[in-house]
Image (cartoon, grey):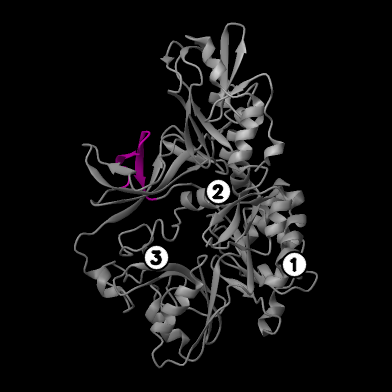
Amino acid sequence: MKEINELNLPGDIRYAEDHEWARLEGDRIRVGLDDYAQDQLGDIVFVELPQIGDTFEKGKEFATVESVKAVVECYLPVGGEIIAVNTALEESPELVNKNPYNDGWFVDVNPSDPSEMDDLMTNAECLEKLKGAD
Amino acid sequence: MQKETKKTPLYDWHVAHGANMVSFGEYEMPLWYPAGAKKEHLAVLTKAGIFDTSHMALVMVIGPDAFELLQLCLTKDLYACVGKDKSPLVPGRCVYGAFLNESGKVIDDAILYQLEHNTYMTVVNAGLGGEVARHLMAYRDRRNVEINDLTDKIGKMDIQGPMAARILMKILVDHEEVFKDMLYFTFKGHFDEASPLADKVRLIDGTPLLLSRTGYTGEFGFEIFVDQFHLVKVWEMIFDAGQDFGLLPCGLAVRDSLRASAVLPLSHQDIGPWPFINHPWPFALPFNPDGTDFTKKFIGNEALKDIDKPEYTYAFTGYDLRKVSVCDQTIVLDSEGNKIGLVLTCVCDIGIGRHGDRIYSISSPDKPENFKPHGLSCGFVKVKSKLDPGQVVELKDERRKIKVMIVSDIRPDRTALCPIEEIIEQKEKRL
């Protein structure tokens, strides 16, 4: 298990309470699971993603992640329509463990209200919260 | 006051090697190491893994009446328990059974070893040494027998997987003699230097071991008992010897996935405070040949014969690797959607998969070309009605429903019973 100071929490993305991340890429928002979550879950063996065209409000369950240890739901950090899903995770769910912020992304969202990004935590805020919980 | 957690002598080693440590019973134990549970699981199926099992408890039962007491308390007929022809227990042999209370409910399951005439050792689960020792004391009556809980004196580790013998060959004195006639559920040697048995199995540095061809993974391998003082050293010797063979240290996560798909129960989860009958482990009970009666009387036997509302425990296999989370609300539904029972264990065996209408393991000799297992969920359910292998039921937790099939076995082509000479030869060819 990583120590808090070993966690990779890049500064160019925002973090939700449940350890989803969101990154603004042009006019879409890419979403995934952060380093803390993948480390806690252990080897991820299956990721159940939504369909392109599905829409979710902010905070609604949009994906399920299955690790050797547990099954957890993921909540969409920013509401909107799913416009892309990472199909590579079907064959290689371990990408979420190896590279949670790049190859291990989950979905792209066309946000209905881009300002919802502002409600999410910065990496510094996320780190503070983790330190507080430890 | 917070209860202090216990550490095994290998705690520092686990931490230094990056293990993810969790509380398990009273102990801090590794859940997995940096390789991850998936690689650890596959290592045991195809190469080898080592497990720190020194949290398990060990109770010695010694004296002229030890046999009689154990025959009364263990669910195995010690006069008829060894091999196909059911011969009596003898020194060098061990058997699997359970200790029950008068209501036929499980106190714990156990492996009973006969070390010498009048000398027995029983290995039970973490934290239960005291309870099993007290249970034996309670039924001792006027029998001439001593009962000693040696839990914190003896260390234990398991090496499991097809390369296990090849690895031990590098560090055992006279491995040919040690491995000779070493069938499944036999053992040799002793952890106590003072025992005349100690010379039967020694490491090249002289450390005496009790080496047992048993395990909790369904794969070929050994359980090793050693004085706790030597445990870290022996662990490191095996770890070093295993580096050329793909040996990985393995945590509790894969212990659970490997044992469940080998149809082995976890005490107080798959067996527990309910009658120990109508389950996939009839070999742990002293049934007569046609299964209509027991061949001996034992604590709990009357209760097992007279059950009002029987419940049945079955193994199941899923259709993909998705699991349900096991809690009291996780239920079993029949084809009409009626609740018929509870899920006891649900794990994923990442080393097996379906191909056509068959299940193969990554180590199946006849697996299809390019077979890549995606994993299957599996485990145990306890239900109110009798089911047959092949019947499909649904498991439902608060998140999802999964279809699973009731089965008589889960992971195919396990190596636990593979003759020792054969597995050494096979692995020599492959190297």
Q: Residue at x 58, y 6 (%)?
A: A27
Q: Nearer the viewer, residue A115 or B406?
A: A115
Image location of residue B226, percent across then percent down: 67, 71
Chain identifier of the residue bearing label 3 in the image: B
Which tag, 1 or 2, sits closer to the chain's start? Answer: 1
Which tag, 2 or 3, sits closer to the chain's start? Answer: 2
What's the mark number on residue A9? none
- Element under label 1? loop
Above or below, A33 against B168 in this view is above
Counting other residues with Cα less than 10 Å from the Cα at mark 3, is it few (<14), some (14-19), or many (20 or more)? some
Q: Nearer the viewer, residue B252 or B49?
A: B252
Chain identifier of the residue bearing label 2 in the image: B
Q: In the rendered image, which residue does mark 3 sit on?
A: B283
Disc 3/disc 1 C-alpha distance (Å): 33 Å
Which tag, 3 or 1, sits closer to the chain's start? Answer: 1
Residue located farthest toward the right when viewing the structure as drawn:
B205
Q: In the rendered image, which residue does mark 1 sit on?
A: B172
Q: Residue at x 63, y 55 (%)?
A: B423
Q: In the rendered image, which residue does mark 2 sit on?
A: B253
Between disc 2 and disc 3, the foreground one is 2
Q: Residue at x 31, y 79 (%)?
A: B297
